[in-house]
Amino acid sequence: MKRNTGCGCGSKSHSHKECPPMQACDTAKTHDHFCTAAVTTTAGGTTEVIQIIGDVTVNTNVEADICLPSSAHDIKNIRKNLYLTQCKAIPVPPATGSGEVTSANLYIEGYVHKNIQYSEGCDGHVRDYSVNVPFKCYQLVTGLRPIFFRGFSQKSSQVQEIREIAEDGMGSDRCSFGSRHFEFFNEPVECRLLNHTINEFEFPHSFDRWGNFEKLTEKLTINFTVRLTQLQRT
């Protein structure tokens, strides 16, 4: 088996932000080309529009320890901004395998970017320090507007093989075989951040003999709303 010498786990120098195209492979020689085409009329409307599946409000609590680059006498100001690095909604399909679904597993990751301004003493300079506080939230969301799900695909073609009997009638013909494979392409559920509210408490510690501190333990309550949408036929 050929060893995988591609992108390794945790390798920043070879990581891809977007899904890269598949590696080019050999091309088989084909003999004849023939096809037919027909228009299929399906139930539903005649246009595709982006439908709002739901506005989901998420609440998460985070505790973090922050080490300041120098001793602080007093915190002057803390500015906070929320950024999402992942927001993926995976529909939970019905038992029948196709149709409309109203629930999805929501996977959210992000961070709170904090800009801390503090003084180093009664007559000291005001310093500026920035730090990211990461968080994760994985939750099942129910009660959404209908999400259209076309169906499952079949990853392995060996599950549904087509075999012919051998000439002696005693088994399968090893020189003649086929298979059935299919894929359904579902429209993804998109995610967009609408608003956020961050409440926090700061607890300084690691004081020196002058009453200055170098560390903060903070407790954050993060509330934000994401909008889930899907391209649907109407």
Image (cartoon, grey):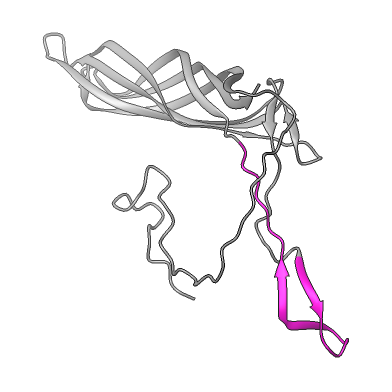
Does residue 208 appear anywhere in the picture? Answer: no
- Nearest the viewer among 106 and 52 is 52
- Nearest the viewer among 40 and 180 is 40
In the picture provided, is 154 more to the left or to the right than 226? right
Tell me the residue at 46%/13% (across/down). 195
Q: Where 137 falls versus 17 (above or below)?
A: above
Count the labels in the image: 0
Tell me the residue at 61%/42% (across/down). 185
- Nearest the viewer among 45 and 8 is 45
User: Residue 54: image x %, image y %?
Assistant: 62, 18
Tell me the residue at 38%/51% (across/down). 10
Does residue 64 appear anywhere in the picture? Answer: yes
Magenta stretch: includes residue 162: yes
Magenta stretch: includes residue 229: no
- Location of the C terminus by quadrant is top right
Q: Quadrant of residue 150?
A: top right
Q: Where 182 falls versus 68 (above or below)?
A: below
Q: Where 159 falls versus 99 (above or below)?
A: below
Q: Where 177 falls versus 192 (above or below)?
A: below
User: Residue 215: image x %, image y %?
Assistant: 31, 26
In the picture provided, is 110 more to the left or to the right than 148? left
In the picture provided, is 96 more to the left or to the right than 117? right
User: Residue 103: image x %, image y %?
Assistant: 70, 28
> In the orientation shown, which residue stands out farthest toward the right?
169
In the picture provided, is 41 more to the left or to the right than 199? right
- Nearest the viewer among 42 and 119 is 42
User: Residue 100: image x %, image y %?
Assistant: 74, 29
Residue extent of the magenta highlight: 161-186
